[in-house]
Image: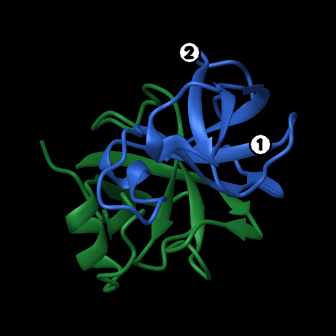
Chain colours: A green, B blue
């Protein structure tokens, strides 16, 4: 799982099977202090996250299918699984 | 999912059976500022994306599931075409 910050939203009308009617957000990976690290990516939103939220993303197919509760979505891999309230170190 | 721009097509006549009838495209990965991020790769495209369009793609096993066959030699596939990205930077 990776920590990331939601930095934007994506509008997409042509999608593959499994992605229909799902919200896609742009995620920027961050370190525990909130500094941007690495390249941003897209993720399907399963927790009603919004722009500027700190979130937890999962990049694994089986977990993703369980989270979006669609066993038939075989092409889905990256999902937002949680909104992070606080990190204590 | 990573995202990138379609920068070309790959034409192949002699290919494995599973690839027959499938379009292969050259994808240049991009970052959030739509700048080049890393090396270009070849992906299976079932959505008929055009050259110049921004797309998102998935890698590994999930990519091969884009084709409804049991076994597929495919490690990247276009999952959708981006119409618009709304970015909101507030570091």
- The residue nearer to you, when weighing A81 against B91, is A81
Tag 1, which secondary structure?
A: strand
Residue A57 located left or right of residue B54:
left
Q: Residue at x 30, y 65 (%)?
A: A85
- The residue nearer to you, when weighing A73 against A53, is A73
Residue A4 located left or right of residue A84:
right
Tag 2, which secondary structure?
A: loop
Q: Residue at x 75, y 33 (%)?
A: B5
In this rendering, the answer to whether A2 lies above or below A49 is above
In this rendering, the answer to whether A27 lies above or below B74 is below
Residue B21's spot in the image, x, y percent? 64, 49
Residue A50's spot in the image, x, y percent? 56, 69
| Residue ID for mark 1 | B54
Residue B46's spot in the image, x, y percent? 65, 55
Q: How many marks?
A: 2
Q: What is the crowding at mark 1: few (fewer than 14 residues within 10 Å), some, or many (at least 20)? A: many
- The residue nearer to you, when weighing A45 against B28, is B28
Of pointers 2 and 1, the one earlier in the residue sequence:
2
| Residue located farthest toward the left when viewing the structure as drawn | A89
Screen quadrant of the C terminus of chain A: top left
Q: Chain of mark 1?
A: B
In this rendering, the answer to whether B12 lies above or below B91 is above
Q: Residue at x 40, y 78 (%)?
A: A47
What's the CA distance linking mark 2 and mark 1?
A: 15 Å
Q: Residue at x 74, y 55 (%)?
A: B81
Residue A88 located left or right of residue B24:
left
Q: Which mark is residue B10?
A: none
| Residue ID for mark 2 | B38
Q: Chain of mark 2?
A: B
């Amino acid at each position: 799982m990776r920590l990331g910050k939601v930095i934007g939203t994506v509008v997409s009308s042509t999608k593959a099977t499994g992605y229909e009617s799902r919200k896609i957000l742009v995620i920027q990976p961050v370190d525990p202090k909130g500094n941007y690290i690495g390249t941003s990516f897209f993720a399907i939103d399963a927790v009603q996250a919004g722009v500027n939220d700190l979130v937890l993303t999962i990049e694994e197919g089986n977990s993703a299918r369980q989270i979006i509760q669609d066993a038939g979505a075989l092409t889905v891999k990256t999902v937002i699984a949680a909104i992070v309230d606080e990190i204590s170190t | 999912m990573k995202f990138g721009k379609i920068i070309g097509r790959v034409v192949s006549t002699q290919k494995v059976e599973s690839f027959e009838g499938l379009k292969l495209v050259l994808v240049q990965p991009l970052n959030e500022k739509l700048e080049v991020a890393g090396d270009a790769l070849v992906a299976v495209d079932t959505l008929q994306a055009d050259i110049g369009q921004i797309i998102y793609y998935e890698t590994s096993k999930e990519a091969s599931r884009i084709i409804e066959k049991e076994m597929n030699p495919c490690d990247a596939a276009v999952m959708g075409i981006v119409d618009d990205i709304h970015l909101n930077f507030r570091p």
